[in-house]
Image: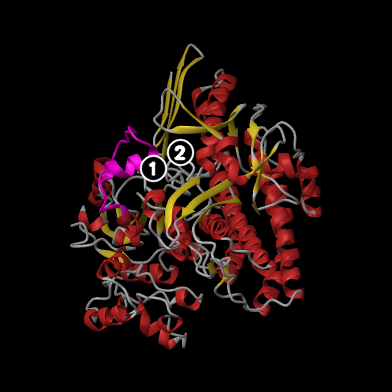
């Protein structure tokens, strides 16, 4: 039996899936990434420090804020720039806003149709209009947060090296705060909706890697591996090695224990105790734990994170307003810092994202390496796909195909973002 | 019967499709007017003849060319959606370099990748009936182009420059802040959003029809830009020469 799905739908980017089964035994399982490479690391080279982030943002339209933030952190680390607490707060707001819009897009528009038995949520089938309206209302709130702080939901314009070229009026944040509070019934309905579906069981222990540090961090400078060991982000080439798969020209990333996964379940594994109060209650209600991560239940992990980031955005707005949010000049590089090497690490919606840069004395970028979440998770996804084929080989072909597509979507892969798959040559 | 509309993505970041999906206030109403027949990112299924095909991304290699031609063959109107489709966008930055060297730089020496070729704008491969410029596109302008095509009118883009929108918004001149700005020669329609956010214009919407290049080059020279730097500025979002045609 051969299963072939060309141009998989409801994922970001293009991929084909091929599975070869002989008398119920798995012969081959191939996930082909059908994206033309865009060579971002090469085209970033030669740019002055202030021009790198606006270009790096274009790596991905869905997580352009995460790429902007990782890029700015890398440049600031290289040039010795220390930003203000206000800048850190506004950047966290961007991270929350982006996670919300990305997770909500995934949950309602990419994943939900599978559980409703519909080809998509838009256009809504008869009876799904209220769901679509709620989904759009929640997504709009997330995007309005990005409009207010970043200047635009796709490819932000206000973040710059050292801070923000423009900050939102306090009244605008106040208004968003009110709308975040008013969104709580929508959150409850979302938890109830996704808590009511049956997710296939695929218990598989996988190495889970996330950002380290206090709280439930989205911007940071340490990594935590599956065994809980902390690593400085700058040491990522040693922590996250590379290997070549025999059937692929793509290099895959691995820790000493093998292929790993990043993303919502990895964050929950390591930072479960730091969830916001509402998110902790949501996790308890949905049976989401930091334990063995069934990849199908990554959908529920996203629901928990939507609640967490909504609540954290509220807290963050309060902190910014209390401290007296006002425009401030971007922080300058340390005098005489010249060139240097820097690594920026953030949690993008799909997981750990690293940008590593080296600048010359004139402040021009001479080398760049970008470690993309989906590229890091590809090895684990291949393993999970093969495990799913073995676990569900007894099912009729349409159901087996459906479960493989469900698994792929549960990873929420962003293949357009994977500008290259993985290279491990630190600048 | 409602006109059938499809969305297709090639080489790009999918940010323009996302900008269409970000039209939260208009989307459901829009879907009363058109039949969303194909949109791989959020919809399973597709095929069949289309009234309008929106194409996002640059075209790289023979497989993408063939896929684009097939879309063209079954569409009455084909629209280039966003800078990558319209002018090759940031993908153009790799166009002037040897693709073998790019592969070696990013993937390591000896790496072999399929489907290579220079990234090209859609119009370099098939006839294009209309365009929505920008990186990313402006949602309202997308609706404007769609509306024009639906009522049988040729969509029009602003004929003036971003500089005009910036002045109307009473924003401080970017040159006065000591930064180079492509606003004087770039087509308007973005509401000078980057300038309002304290950034500069990088020309993502392409050049205005008759740019006043001579005075502009003099301003750039006054700001100390060399010829190579001027070319590099223009090249951020635009292919040099005949736009890859």
Residue lying at 60% horizontally and 40% vertically, measured from the top left: A262
Separation (CA) of disc 2 from disc 1: 7 Å
Side of B74 relative to B41 (left or right): left
Mark 2, residue position? A423
Dividing the picture into quadrants, the one containing residue B217 is: bottom left
Side of B22 relative to B210 (left or right): right
SS at circle 2: loop
* Image color mode: secondary structure
**Residue A388 place in picture, x, y as percent:** 57, 25
- Residue B239's disc number: none
Residue lying at 18% horizontally and 62% vertically, measured from the top left: B242
Side of A139 relative to B113 (left or right): right
Residue that sits furthest to the top in the current view: A23
- Residue B106's disc number: 1
**Residue A353 place in picture, x, y as percent:** 56, 47
The magenta segment: B94-117
**Residue B240 place in picture, x, y as percent:** 23, 62
């Amino acid at each position: 039996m051969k299963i072939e799905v060309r141009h998989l739908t409801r994922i970001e980017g293009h991929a084909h899936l091929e599975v070869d089964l002989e008398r119920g035994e798995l012969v081959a399982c191939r996930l082909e990434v059908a994206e033309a490479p865009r060579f971002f690391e090469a085209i970033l080279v030669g740019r002055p420090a202030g021009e790198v982030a606006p270009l790096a943002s274009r790596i991905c339209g869905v997580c352009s804020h995460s790429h902007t933030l990782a890029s700015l952190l890398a440049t600031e680390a290289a040039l010795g720039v220390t930003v203000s607490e206000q800048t850190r707060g506004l950047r966290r707001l961007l991270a929350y806003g982006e996670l919300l819009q990305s997770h909500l897009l995934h949950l309602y528009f990419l994943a939900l149709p599978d559980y409703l038995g519909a080809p998509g949520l838009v256009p809504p089938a008869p009876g799904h209009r209220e769901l679509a309206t709620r989904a759009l209302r929640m997504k709009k709130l997330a995007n309005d947060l990005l409009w207010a702080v970043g200047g635009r939901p796709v490819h932000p314009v206000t973040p710059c090296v050292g801070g923000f070229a423009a900050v939102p009026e306090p009244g605008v944040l106040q208004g968003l705060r009110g709308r975040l509070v008013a969104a709580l019934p929508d959150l409850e309905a979302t938890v109830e909706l996704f808590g009511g579906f049956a997710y296939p069981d695929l218990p598989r222990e996988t190495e889970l890697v996330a950002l380290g540090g206090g709280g439930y961090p989205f911007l940071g400078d340490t990594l935590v591996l599956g065994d809980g060991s902390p690593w400085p982000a700058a040491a990522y080439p040693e922590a996250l090695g590379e290997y070549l798969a025999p059937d692929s020209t793509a290099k895959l990333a691995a820790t000493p224990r093998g292929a790993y996964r990043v993303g919502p379940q990895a964050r929950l594994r390591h930072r479960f105790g730091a969830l916001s109060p509402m998110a902790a209650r949501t996790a308890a209600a949905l049976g989401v734990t930091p334990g063995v991560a069934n990849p199908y239940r990554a959908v529920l992990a996203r629901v928990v994170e939507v609640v967490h980031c909504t609540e954290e955005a509220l807290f963050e707005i309060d902190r910014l307003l209390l401290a007296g949010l006002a425009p401030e000049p971007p922080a300058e590089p340390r005098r005489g810092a010249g060139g240097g090497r820097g690594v920026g690490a953030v949690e993008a919606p799909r997981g750990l994202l690293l940008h590593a840069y080296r600048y010359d004395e004139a402040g021009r970028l001479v080398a760049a390496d970008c470690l993309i979440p989906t590229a890091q998770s590809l090895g684990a996804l291949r393993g999970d796909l093969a495990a799913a084929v073995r676990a569900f080989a007894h099912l009729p072909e349409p159901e087996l195909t459906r479960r493989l597509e469900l698994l792929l979507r549960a990873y929420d892969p962003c293949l357009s973002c994977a500008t290259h798959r993985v290279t491990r040559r630190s600048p | 019967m409602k006109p059938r509309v499809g969305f297709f993505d090639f080489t790009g970041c999918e940010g323009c499709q996302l900008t269409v999906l970000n039209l939260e206030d208009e989307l459901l109403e829009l879907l009363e007017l058109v039949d969303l027949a194909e949109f791989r990112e959020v919809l399973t299924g597709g095929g069949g003849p289309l009234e309008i095909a929106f194409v996002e991304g640059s075209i790289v290699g023979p497989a993408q060319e063939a896929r684009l031609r097939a879309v063209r063959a079954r569409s009455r109107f084909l629209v280039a959606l966003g800078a990558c489709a319209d002018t090759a966008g940031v993908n153009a930055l790799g166009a002037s370099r040897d693709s073998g060297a790019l592969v070696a730089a990013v993937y390591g020496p000896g790496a072999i990748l399929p489907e290579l070729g220079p990234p090209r704008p859609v119009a370099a491969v098939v006839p294009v009936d209309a365009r929505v410029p920008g990186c990313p596109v402006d949602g309202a302008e997308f609706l404007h182009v769609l509306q024009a095509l639906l009522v049988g009118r040729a969509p029009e883009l602003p004929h003036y420059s971003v500089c005009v929108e910036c002045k109307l918004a009473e924003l401080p001149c970017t040159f006065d802040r000591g930064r180079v700005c492509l606003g004087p020669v770039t087509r308007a329609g973005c509401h000078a959003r980057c300038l309002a956010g304290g950034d500069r214009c990088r020309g993502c919407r392409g050049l205005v029809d008759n740019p006043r290049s001579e005075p502009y080059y003099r301003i750039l020279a006054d700001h100390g830009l060399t010829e190579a730097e001027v070319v590099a500025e223009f090249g951020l979002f635009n292919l040099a020469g005949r736009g890859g045609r």
